[in-house]
Amino acid sequence: MQKRILLVEDDHDIHQLIESQLQQDHYHVDSARDGEEAVALFHSGKFDLILLDLMLPKINGMDLLRHFRESSKVPVLIISAKGSDLDKAMGLGFGADDYISKPFSMIELTARVQAAIRRATLYAETDSKSAEPPVISFKDLILDLHSFSVNVRGHHVPLTSKEFHILKLLMTNHSRVFTKEQIYQFIWEDDYYGNENVINVHIRRLREKIEEDPSTPQYIRTIWGIGYKMGD
């Protein structure tokens, strides 16, 4: 079945270039050139990937990303001229799955798109066929693999796709210490090039959501010089 991509980009030339490349790669592309149009298209059907510019008219990209994450775990790949570490950290922290800075090559974009869709498809297939128990618990933290929901101390906690899978990795191997490189390779399924900031942002956001006191975490412990594990 043809994969469906929502392309949100207001620059006419870049939009046309990306749209043409994706169509050549046999993707179905729905195009939005401002934030309001993106919201309308997002709610009109199911997408396999969203390509999202940050600097958009009417509704900016960060606000759009937060809106998407309220109801969907669809992979989001940010494409932006705002390529600072802070911008990348904010995008990933708000729930983006990947970030590519302008200018970029079509070869790199195609590879990132394929990798993001492949990961999402693999997760869906794994979860549907897995023999794992539907619920994993650690202390008063409960992870429901069927509904992709998390409850902490009796309260529902919304997580992004990456946050959910990082927590799942740690909870299903609660006695094991994972290095940042291992977490990146397991969750992103890509080579690790010292992308510590990506892992740091996701762990920090996870702690802010599940820990009573993120500065003194009881669930996700830091093993200094090594990595992370579930707390004893």
Image (cartoon, rainbow, N blue to C red):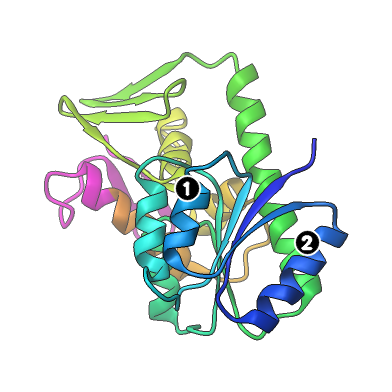
Q: Quadrant of the C terminus?
A: top left
Residue displayed at 36% across by 29% down: 149
Q: CA distance from mark 2 to mark 1?
A: 25 Å
Per the image, is 231 magenta? yes
Instruction: Give the percent coordinates (x, y) of residue 6.
Output: 61, 55
Kind of residue indicated by mark 1: Lys
Residue displayed at 46% across by 28% down: 172
Is any part of residue 225 visible from this angle?
no
Residue displayed at 46% across by 51% down: 40
**Left/right of residue 155 with respect to residue 169 in the rendered view:** left
Other-residue count near label 2 (Cα within 10 Å), few / some / many at <14 / 14–19 / ≥20? many
In this view, 230 is above or below 205: above
Q: Quadrant of the N terminus?
A: top right
Q: Residue furthest left?
A: 213
- Residue range of the region highlighted in magenta in the rendering: 207-232
Instruction: Give the percent coordinates (x, y) of residue 116.
Output: 65, 52
Q: Which mark identifies residue 162?
A: 1
Residue displayed at 42% across by 29% down: 148
Kind of residue indicated by mark 2: Leu
Per the image, is 126 magenta? no
